[in-house]
């Protein structure tokens, strides 16, 4: 009986780690040009470990996500996507000056015991000037990178249900496996130093105590993980 209990315990830990350690993220250039096509890619895996999952290995129904484009004036559009082995490609044409928001929110169909998982990601593309529409995205993280170069500080703000989110864990995953964990302050903000140039994935996560029916099962908790990708020069 003890051996069986330990086996179930370790399998449970593995299942939670597998779901939580993985993340969905968008990669795109932060600057766009008016009336020109702007491309983006969507990945799923463990960036800190250098692991990108092929699409047919993505957890549950995560690959069924929709990419929502929000224009600087608040107009929303769902973008088409094309599978490309270990990621999805998409694109749009910027017809307004300002900042476009690219957003994904995908709840996983399969829960683990009484917990379900929700993956999301966000990216911002500025065309000529910074002007962002008011966002009603449930959970996201934003980073200010104007003029930021390697060796300088990056400021992060975490938002939940339209408000700042204090005391939220944020993991910064940098080039070559570098990671750092911080927590947002009372204003929902956190900072880190970009130690070198390259790609950084920032992930905020939270767990909500909530009882509900989900895919025919009783759920007591919702784990949410959201990301944004930065390219530091």
Image (tube, rainbow, N blue to C red):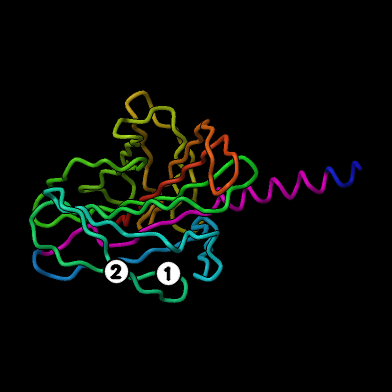
Does the magenta portion include 11?
yes
Give the side of residue 121 with respect to residue 14, left or right: left
Task: Tell me: residue 129, above or below residue 87.
Answer: above
Residue drawn where x is 30% and y is 66% of the image = 40
Give the side of residue 44 with respect to residue 124, left or right: right
Relative image position of residue 114 (x, y in whole percent):
62, 40
Relative image position of residue 153 (x, y in whole percent):
32, 41
Snapshot quadrant of residue 9? top right
Helix, strand or loop status at disc 2:
loop
Frontmost residue, 206 versus 30: 206
| Residue 80: numbered disc | 2
Residue drawn where x is 86% and y is 47% of the image = 4
Which residue is outermost to the bottom?
A: 84
Give the side of residue 17 with respect to residue 200, left or right: right
| Residue 87: numbered disc | 1
Residue drawn where x is 20% and y is 53% of the image = 70
Frontmost residue, 74 versus 165: 74
In the rendered structure, which disc, 1 or 2, sits on the residue that comes first in sequence? 2
Helix, strand or loop status at disc 1:
loop
Relative image position of residue 108 (x, y in whole percent):
50, 53
C-alpha gap between disc 1 and disc 2? 14 Å
Badge 1: residue crowd in 10 Å (few <14, some 14–19, many ≥20): some
Q: Quadrant of the N terminus?
A: top right
Residue drawn where x is 37% and y is 34% of the image = 190
Which residue is outermost to the front?
A: 216
Does the magenta portion include 22?
yes
Q: Quadrant of the C terminus?
A: bottom left
| Residue 200: numbered disc | none
- What residue span does the magenta drawing correspond to? 6-33
């Amino acid at each position: 009986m003890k051996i069986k209990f330990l086996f179930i315990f370790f399998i449970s830990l593995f299942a939670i780690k597998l779901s939580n350690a993985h993340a969905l993220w968008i990669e795109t250039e932060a600057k766009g040009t008016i009336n020109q096509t702007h491309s983006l890619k969507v990945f799923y895996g463990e960036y800190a470990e250098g692991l990108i999952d092929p699409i047919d290995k993505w957890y549950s129904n995560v690959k069924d996500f929709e990419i929502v484009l929000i224009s600087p004036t608040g107009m929303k559009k769902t973008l088409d996507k094309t599978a490309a082995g270990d990621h999805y490609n998409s694109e749009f044409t910027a017809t307004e000056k300002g900042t476009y928001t690219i957003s994904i929110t995908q709840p996983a169909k399969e829960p683990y015991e009484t917990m379900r998982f929700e993956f999301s990601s966000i990216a911002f593309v500025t065309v000529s000037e910074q002007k962002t529409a008011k966002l009603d995205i449930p959970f996201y993280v934003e980073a200010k990178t104007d003029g930021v170069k390697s060796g300088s500080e990056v400021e992060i703000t975490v938002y939940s249900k339209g408000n700042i989110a204090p005391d939220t864990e944020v993991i910064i995953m940098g080039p070559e496996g570098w990671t750092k964990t911080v927590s947002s302050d009372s204003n929902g903000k956190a900072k880190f130093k970009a130690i070198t140039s390259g790609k950084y994935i920032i992930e905020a996560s939270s767990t909500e105590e909530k009882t509900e029916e989900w895919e025919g099962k009783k759920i007591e908790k919702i784990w949410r993980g959201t990301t944004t990708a930065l390219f530091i020069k």
